[in-house]
Image (cartoon, grey):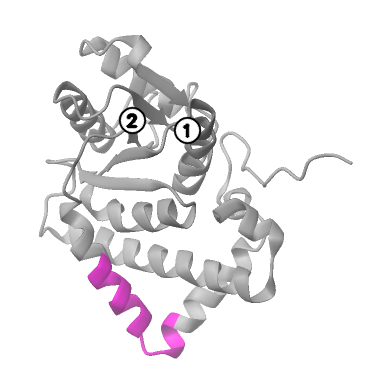
Amino acid sequence: MGMNIPYHAPPRASFPQKLGPGGATTLGLAILTALGFAGLPWVFHFRQVLRGIHGDTLIPADAILVLGRRLEQDQPTQVFEARLAHAEALWRLGLAPHIFVAGGTTGNARRSEAEAGRDWLVARGVPVEALILEDRSQHTLENLFNVRADLRVAGWQTLLLVSDPLHLARAKAMAQGLDLEVRCSAAPGSPPVQGSFAWWRRAALEAFLLHWYHTGMAYSRLIGGKRQLDRVT
């Protein structure tokens, strides 16, 4: 019998392809529960998103993980550059000897997010031997899932997870769901500007995405959905 390999979205995946097994069902449930409970689940997760923007107290770890971000014209965006610059700063402080750069080939890009991130860091003087690429994933959950496999092979335990402030609550929840030992660190200066309309709009979206993640976890456990749980635990 062949191995039961968890579903992974293909390169340049469309939104339906990224959903994977059970994704459309859990998205519908997340919308229904948010509306059915008068928005209270969204409000609860909105507060979690805002509480997460400052990250955690940092201690030395085995590696730093920079979560990927879709490229524009094959180059890192301002958001991705802010993440990379912060990872470089943590590395130069000696908080970890290695940097994982995550992200596969997405959108219309001709190279992976991980490759673009590596080139950016190397141009800033980070030695290539300090960098490890995770270049297969299409979204945050796959970033973390694939890096977990690399951590286990290397015998490492702890990660400093770097992303923009509003992304940290969801990224941390997913990492904990995968039983990863992480501390989160927010990339300073990452767009959008805190307090702007775009910032609040992104916060609102992250709150719903966090609600969707927890709804999917609860639903998958309730029905014993092995294909879904294999992707998230």
Label 1 sits on what residue type? Leu
Corner quadrant of residue 47: bottom left
- Quadrant containing the N terminus is top right
Identify the element where label 2 is drawn: strand
Q: Specify whether residue 44 is painted magenta.
A: yes
Give the residue drawn at x 21%, y 25%: 91
- Residue nearer the viewer, 114 or 232: 232
Q: Is residue 107 visible?
A: no
Left of 25 or right of it: where is 107? left
- Residue nearer the viewer, 227 or 38: 227
Corner quadrant of residue 170: bottom left
Left of 108 or right of it: where is 123? left
Specify the segment rendered in magenta: 34-48
How crowded is the residue under tag 2: few (<14 C-alpha within 10 Å), some, or many (20+)? many
Find residue 43 and report its horizontal and vertical position in percent: 29, 78
Find residue 125 and report its horizontal and vertical position in percent: 21, 10
Find residue 135 and report its horizontal and vertical position in percent: 50, 27
Identify the element where label 1 is drawn: helix
Assess whether mark 1 and mark 2 are in contact (beta carbons under 8 angstroms): yes
Q: Is residue 218 above or below residue 151?
A: below
Corner quadrant of residue 206: bottom left
| Residue ID for mark 1 | 151
- Quadrant containing the C terminus is bottom right
Find residue 41 and report its horizontal and vertical position in percent: 37, 80
Q: Is residue 132 above or below residue 149?
A: above
Closer to the N terminus: mark 2 or mark 1?
2
Left of 27 or right of it: where is 190? left
Label 2 sits on what residue type? Ala
Q: CA distance from mark 2 to mark 1?
A: 9 Å
| Residue 63: image tag | 2
